[in-house]
Amino acid sequence: MENRETEKKKDGSTLIKRAWRTVKSAAGRLVKRNSTAPPRPLPDTDSAHPQPDPSVPEQKESLDLTDLELDPSFFEPPDFLDLTDLLPSFPKSPGAALKESEDPSWLRTISCLGPSPLPLSELYDVEEDIGRGYFGTVRKGIRKSDGQQVAIKFIKKLTSGRFADRFITVPGVSEPLFAEVALNLLLNRPPLSPFIVHMLDWFEEEDQYILILEYSEPCRDLYGFVLQEKLSESQACSLMYQAVLAAKHCLDGGVFHRDIKLDNYVINTATNRVQLIDFGCGEVAESGIKGQFIGFACPPEYFADFEYAAEPTTVWSLGIMMHRTVCSCNPLRKEDGRLSFDSRVSAEFQELITWCLALNPSERATMEDILQHEWFRQERMSGAI
């Protein structure tokens, strides 16, 4: 029995490697054809600044794939990971017991650099809405080639105003790309995280960008789930551990999400897997970012000189989110500046949140501090890292 399973895995590995060599060879030829194209400078990606950035090129109606200088070494085949070894346990779930993943990461096809040269309608069937906001709509979809269910995000192009489209340069692509696409591409570099919804493909049309994203059912936003289920502290701990792993993976990959909150995580209620979504407010992780703050939880240091850094801001946002998940409210401070906690929550939780919400960013916990904290001890022992 074990021999047959081993042979299946070897066959799957051989097939993927053959396909990758073909893609890599084609990408190499494309690099050679475009080898004379000069690199574009990295634009100022402060989305909150109202003035146009002269380093950002004028927006094209569509991005010609032949204009892109692709570096085939940018993407390598993902490591073969077993998601069942990565997911934390979730005892007595209000939804359902944690199940083995039916979608091991080596089956995830993530190989897009430039926009698809074919129209959306030739590759995907578009179905009903599953989300709608100011910037666009998310709908269910089916990939025609294999019947894979996906989420399709339609984002309106905005050429002016506070939320005008931003463009970011990523390694392996000579042209600056729409920011949300660029950040997704940065996160598509292996190893992939099972706690992030990854982009599978993308399109550019005259008036909109279209992102093809992973999607699994039954799925709902974490805010509604937490609000409805009234989780115990141990159950909340299991969910928050996954949320922290997702945020840390972003920073490790050079991506600053900037809008960490319950609404921007989804949970598969059949497996209790939590995943981070929506990089529309995201930015390249840098030492310091100036300009108007964009996101849900503004850190106190921003009000000193209108500057904030990726990791301390992410930790601040996680502290507020974890407090809201366990205590069902935003954190409050007493007159003496100390945080107020419900007497029913553990001392370990109070210590972690106090550390995450330190007013001085230099005294705040780091991402690694959070993961190694005693409150997450049971999750670490379960082998979730």
Image (cartoon, rainbow, N blue to C red):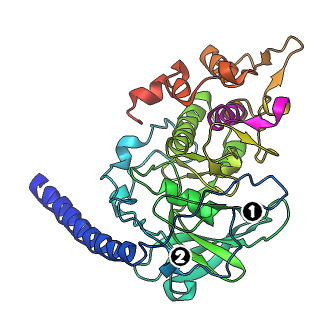
Relative to 217, 35 lies left or right:
left
Relative to 275, 303 lies left or right:
right
Residue 19's x, y, as percent? Answer: 27, 72
Per the image, label 2 sits on a secondary structure element best described as loop
120, above or below 330, in the image: below
Residue 104 appears in view = no
Report if residue 306 lies within the magenta region: yes
- Region of the chain picked out in magenta, as a range: 304-321
The Cα–Cα distance between marks 1 and 2, rounded to whole angstroms, is 24 Å
Residue hosting label 2 = 115
The quadrant of the image that shows the N terminus is bottom left
What residue appears at the point 48 percent right and 58 percent down from the top-left corner? 171
Residue 71's x, y, as percent? Answer: 40, 65
The quadrant of the image that shows the C terminus is top left
Q: Which amino acid is tagged 2?
A: Pro
Per the image, label 1 sits on a secondary structure element best described as loop
Q: Which dot, 1 or 2, sits closer to the camera?
A: 1
**Quarter of the figure with residue 17:** bottom left
User: For the view shown, which residue lies furthest in the right direction?
Assistant: 335
Residue 312 appears in view = yes
What residue appears at the point 46 percent right and 25 percent down from the top-left corner? 378
What residue appears at the point 53 percent right and 21 percent down from the top-left corner? 373
Residue hosting label 1 = 54
**Quarter of the figure with residue 129:** bottom right
